[in-house]
Amino acid sequence: MDKAYDILIIDDDRDLVHSMRIVLETKPYTIRTAHNGKEGYHRIEEKIPDLIILDVMMATDTEGFDLAYRLRNQERYRDIPILMFTSFTQKMAETGADKFQHIMGEEWPVNKFMEKPIDPDVLLKTVEELLRGE
Amino acid sequence: MNLAKELVAQQIFIRRELSERVGWFVGVRWIAIAIATAGALAARLWGFTLPLRPVLFTVAAMVGYNLLFTVVGRRLRQISPDRQRPFQISAHAQIVCDLGALAALIYFTGGFYSPFTLFVLFQIILAGILLEPAYAYIYAGACTAAIGLMGALQAGGTITPYPGLFEHAIYHTDPALRESVSFFIILAAAYLVTAYLVTTIARGLRIKGRALLRFGKELDAANTKLTALYDLVKQMAFCADYQELMDSATQTTARIMGVKACSIKLLDEQRQTLRFASTYGLSQNYLARGDIEIAKSPINQRILQGAVYTIGHIEEKDYFQYPENVRQEGISSMICLPLKVEKRVLGVFCVYSQAQAGFRDADVDFFALVAELTALAMQNLRSELNKSWFLQKAAHQLRSPLNAVDSILKVLRKAYVGPLNEKQTEMLAQCERRIEALSLTIQDLLKLGIKRADSASVDLRPISLAPLLSQFSAVYQTQAKEKGVQLTFSLAPHLPAILGEEKLLDDLYTNLLSNAIKYTPAGKAVQVSLDREDGQRLRLQISDTGIGIPRDQLPRLFTEFFRAENAKAHTDQGTGLGLAIAKEAADRLRGTLQIDSREGQGTCVTCYFPIAS
């Protein structure tokens, strides 16, 4: 049996968080949730999770990125793997004139970037890979 | 604007005039000498008792000093006309010499009663023209005194001038004292009145000359400014970014107006603070003071209410929130006015000068014009960006819940919440398919919005079109084959490169080709051809023998979400955004798009691309 990994989901869409929880709880994972960047940061301070699943657009358009950068800039949180979801396709985030381009520059602050809708099979597979450190 | 410079220019103008006139004076004297010589000889021949030798001696002296002045004049021409003194000395010397020669002539032709006393007027007039007004009076006074002295000496018998021309008039009746005195008064009056008249007229002419010079300069400056203004407007029209537009405005304005600095401050949404949005020529130190609270800044309050503020002497005013900073920055005068479109105030536009009272009324008017144009350009750009922003925001708001529904359905269908029967799984799959179609529409919409927002920043480079088309076509060949549509290519060999951008060409071509395949029934054909139209353009044609487009619906074809009636009947797939995206891409590629279609017979889309030079 796998070690009970601690996964933190940060997304303002409660329904989506609920269904992700259902999918992830089919595996031996402990799921914690937060609905905005600030609450998410508190959860991380309480206990460092093994993985963060993070949404880009919450109250502000770049809330997810803001949190990711904040974590990457701190020694103790730097190595937490982050899986980021957004409704923008990756292609657009890379090439479009949207505001992320200015914020991101060259460096992606996340380990994996995926677009919604979320396929549960792909989600489980990706989470497993990230937890194994791939 | 630069008073000192203008004064120098004016003086140079006046001095140049003086140097020219001094030269002219020498020329005129040769004529006078010739006439004097001829006159003396003629008088002698006519039987007057004129002492020929002394007169000719005087004329010879005139020739001598005029030769000297000719040489001096040549030297003077080589020195810069902004040095005024040498010309003044030369003018004085010439007048004094002439008066000396004239005194001799008067002495030899009757002294006090000589008619040549009238010729003194010429010298007074010349002094009035060549020199400062005071000298005309000085010479007039000196000559009056000299003539008076000569008259007194003559009456006392100390000197006995030659009887000259009017021997009989002078000696046959001895004039009484009162006659001599009244003669003298009339002569003196003539000298002084002449001095008065000539200096008055000369002064008027000088003022007019200066005004003319100033008008000329102003006209020149106005022309330069207008050209610069035109450039500014042109530059602003090409800005796709708010910051870029404002930076371009501040930099160009400072340059055109020849001032130290320029700034645009924008109002925040609560309309309580003004923030420096773009500056040119202001130090970091000055900007570090941060935002300006409108409540604490009476000057900005008034500007925002619509007042134009011109401050000539900063230190006299006490309505700055940070007066120390203004002083430290070396700003001595400024113009501030509201940036507004109709009644909507966007912020405050300022120019700063290091000179006290550095701005004239014309500068204020000009700056008001610049501000108006800048505000208009900002407003235009804002509405463009707003449209795109709204579109993107709306698309995102639509996609978010849709994605959530899609994700949840997938969890359900893949039996994460319990087993499903076959019928249930099938119905959930149907839902997912419909959601996918809707999602596609929104994605296209998002794409279009981003393109509009990004419209000015396209980087075109030479691209070889034919290989790119083959690459893009791979997917569609399979698609056409599956559908039973015959897809053929005819790409001319050795075509020159066009100016393009890969992603835009992808948007353009794949939207057109997928439309052609979509609206062409099985058994019919789609043809793609690429050739050279003329020296300047390549022609790409995508023609099909599909359902065609009804004539009355052709004009609306490039409108977003528009789908022709027969297209909707043909297939329910399609967002109505494909052609709008293709048109947008063609515009940005500086190409043109043409559509010919006949309902039931087919459609031919032609794109023209400029060849890279």
Image (tube, rainbow, N blue to C red):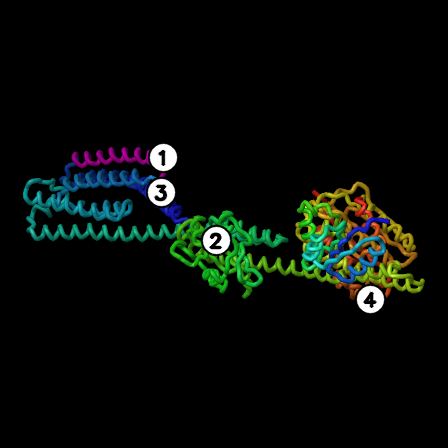
Give B254 or B516, whichever is nearer the viewer: B254
Residue B34, how many percent across, how many down? 26, 38
First in sequence, mark 3 or 4: give its number.
Answer: 3
Pointer 3: what residue?
A: B16
Residue at image position (22%, 40%) is B96
Chain letter of mark 3 equals B
Q: Amino acid at mark 1?
A: Gln
Chain letter of mark 4 equals B
Distance from the alpha carbon under mark 2 to that under mark 4: 58 Å
Q: Is-magenta flag for residue B76?
A: yes
Query: Is residue B170 visible to us here?
Result: yes
Chain letter of mark 2 equals B
Q: Is-magenta flag for residue B250?
A: no
First in sequence, mark 2 or 3: give its number.
Answer: 3
Q: Please tell me whether the stretch drawn in magenta is mainly helix, strand or loop.
A: helix
Judged from this view, the residue extending furthest toward the right is: B422
Give A81 or B333, whichever is nearer the viewer: A81
Q: Amino acid at mark 4?
A: Glu
Q: Is residue B277 left or right of residue A82?
A: left
Pointer 2: what residue?
A: B351
Residue B591, how many percent across, how many down? 72, 51
**Marks 2 and 4: same chain?**
yes
Residue B573, how many percent across, how many down? 84, 61
For the residues carrying marks 3 and 4, which lies nearer the camera in this image? 4
Pointer 1 with pointer 3, Cβ within 8 A: no
Pointer 4: what residue?
A: B565
Q: Is residue B223 left or right of residue B595?
A: left
Distance from the alpha carbon under mark 2 to that under mark 1: 43 Å
